[in-house]
Each structure stands twice: as structure tokens, then as C-alpha cells.
Image (tube, rainbow, N blue to C red):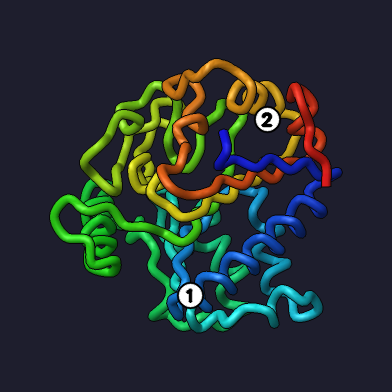
């Protein structure tokens, strides 16, 4: 794919630094062009290091961005209270938003303590209001951060779930059989309308699925990360060597 760039780094530290540099580059460009920047954050363990680097007073990344001009959303969330150890919001808030003193008016989390369907509906309503996309329009995020699970899922788009075929909703609350619970997630049409996507994938447990996602035949029902194919944007894959070990061709920095 011409809109896909794959970069393999030695380890999570290097991967996170490369992703942080790209984040800063995209944020600077977006703010310069239109005075603001919208990003949907990812949960999970891999992006935490990225957030810590961006917020670290001893790193250059923090000073290179006008954080007051960024609005923060989430690509997906667990149906838990915002102070739960499992909350994607809590992880990002503690590692990125609080250290940067981001204004609450720039933080737009899922109301994940609500009923799942209500939370999804309310988030969709807010997205339409914020992006001024009433009716059947689709918001265009400047950047969506994503990870990938060992089963090939991304955001809360899991294998063989109905949400993979969702074409009307912006936000869904799929029931994930393997966890016995609902999740909240942006739908494929929102992700694929983004200007940029950054994937961060680390760990040997992701290697088999990553080979299928990047080098295998197209099977998005089995490997949902393959569904990410931006209509007019770029997808940046930042991988560590462990995750990339089975790829047919590695592109090292």
C-alpha cells in the first residue's frame, strides 16, 4: 500500500521515541495549518511509554507542541469507571494529560460508567457536534493511535464480530465473547477517514498475527487490523524487532 509506512526498531524504547517524533511532527503540522489538532488515544500497555515520553519535562517532545490546541479523544474503552485500573482513560490521564496540565475542556472521554449502548450513542452524538458532522457525515481525526492484539484486533474491533461490518454508526458497543462484556469503540468508517493513523506493536506474542496482517491475504474478519486502510491518509506502523520477526521484509531506521 502506498499510504502505509512500516518502521522496525530494536525495542519498545526506540519504537516509542519514533512514534513520539511522528506525533510531534503531525501535531505541529496540523496546528500550523488550522490552529488545532484532534487525536484519538489508544489504550493498552504499549502506548503508555509514548505518553510518558511526550509528557516528560526532560524530553524535547513536550516543549515542541502547543498542547493547548490539541483535543483528546479515545479510539476505544472498556465499560468501567474512569478511575478503574482497566480504564484506557485513566492510563492516558495519569501518564499524559495530567502531567501536561491539559484543560478538562480539551479532554473528551467515553462516559464508560454508563450503560454501554448509552455511552456509545452519547459519544457519537458528541463527535457529530464537535466535528460539525450532522446526519451521515463522518468526522476526520487528524490522528488516531492504535495498537494490535495477539489475535489481530485493533481498538475494540475483535475477530468475527458484527462491528467489523458496521457502516452507519460512528461509535459502537460490541459484545466481545472472549471477555464476556461489551466494549466501546470507534467504527471502521471513522478510523479509515482519519488523516493519519499510528500503529504501535511490540512483543513476540504479536509476531504471528502481525505477519498475517501485513504480509498475508486480506482477511479482516479474522485479522481486524487489516481493516485499517485510510481513504486519503497515511498509516504509520512502528514495530519492535520481536513483533516484526516473521515479516517478509523489515524496514529499519
Which residue in the protein does label 2 denote? 206
Which residue in the protein does label 1 denote? 33
Q: Is residue 77 visible?
A: no
Q: In the rendered image of this protein, does residue 103 appear above or below residue 129?
A: below
Residue in the image at 70% along x and 82% along y: 63
Query: What is the quadrant of residue 164 in the picture?
Result: top left
Horizontal side, residue 165 vs residue 200: left or right: left
Residue in the image at 73% along x and 67% along y: 53
Disc 2 packing (10 Å; few <14; some 14–19; many ≥20): many
Residue in the image at 23% along x and 67% along y: 132
Pointer 1 or 2: first along the chain: 1
The numbered mark at residue 228 is: none
Disc 1 packing (10 Å; few <14; some 14–19; many ≥20): few
In the picture as drawn, the residue positioned furthest to the front comes out as 2
Look at the image and tell me in which quarter the N terminus lies. top right
Residue in the image at 55% along x and 28% along y: 152
Amino acid at each position: 500500500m502506498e499510504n502505509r509506512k512500516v518502521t522496525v526498531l530494536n525495542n519498545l524504547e526506540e519504537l516509542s521515541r519514533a512514534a513520539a517524533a511522528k506525533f510531534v511532527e503531525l501535531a505541529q503540522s496540523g496546528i500550523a495549518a488550522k490552529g488545532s489538532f484532534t487525536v484519538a488515544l489508544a489504550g493498552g500497555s504499549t502506548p503508555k511509554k509514548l505518553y510518558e515520553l511526550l509528557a516528560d519535562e526532560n524530553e524535547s517532545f513536550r516543549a515542541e507542541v502547543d498542547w493547548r490546541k490539541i483535543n483528546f479523544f479515545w479510539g476505544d474503552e472498556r465499560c468501567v469507571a474512569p478511575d478503574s485500573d482497566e480504564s484506557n482513560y485513566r492510563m492516558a490521564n495519569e501518564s499524559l494529560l495530567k502531567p501536561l496540565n491539559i484543560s478538562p475542556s480539551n479532554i473528551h472521554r467515553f462516559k464508560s460508567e454508563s450503560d454501554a449502548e448509552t455511552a456509545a450513542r452519547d459519544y457519537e452524538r458528541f463527535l457529530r457536534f464537535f466535528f460539525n458532522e450532522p446526519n451521515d457525515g463522518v468526522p476526520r481525526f487528524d490522528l488516531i493511535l492504535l495498537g494490535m492484539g495477539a489475535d489481530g484486533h485493533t481498538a475494540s474491533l475483535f475477530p468475527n464480530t458484527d462491528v467489523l461490518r458496521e457502516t452507519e454508526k460512528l461509535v459502537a458497543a460490541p459484545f466481545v465473547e472472549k471477555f464476556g462484556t461489551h466494549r466501546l469503540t470507534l467504527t471502521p468508517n471513522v478510523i479509515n477517514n482519519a488523516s493519519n493513523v499510528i500503529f504501535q506493536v511490540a512483543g513476540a506474542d504479536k509476531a504471528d498475527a502481525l505477519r498475517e496482517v501485513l504480509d498475508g491475504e486480506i482477511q479482516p474478519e479474522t485479522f481486524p487490523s487489516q481493516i485499517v486502510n485510510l481513504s486519503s491518509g497515511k498509516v504509520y506502523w512502528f514495530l519492535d524487532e520481536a513483533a516484526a520477526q516473521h515479516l517478509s521484509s523489515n524496514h529499519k531506521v
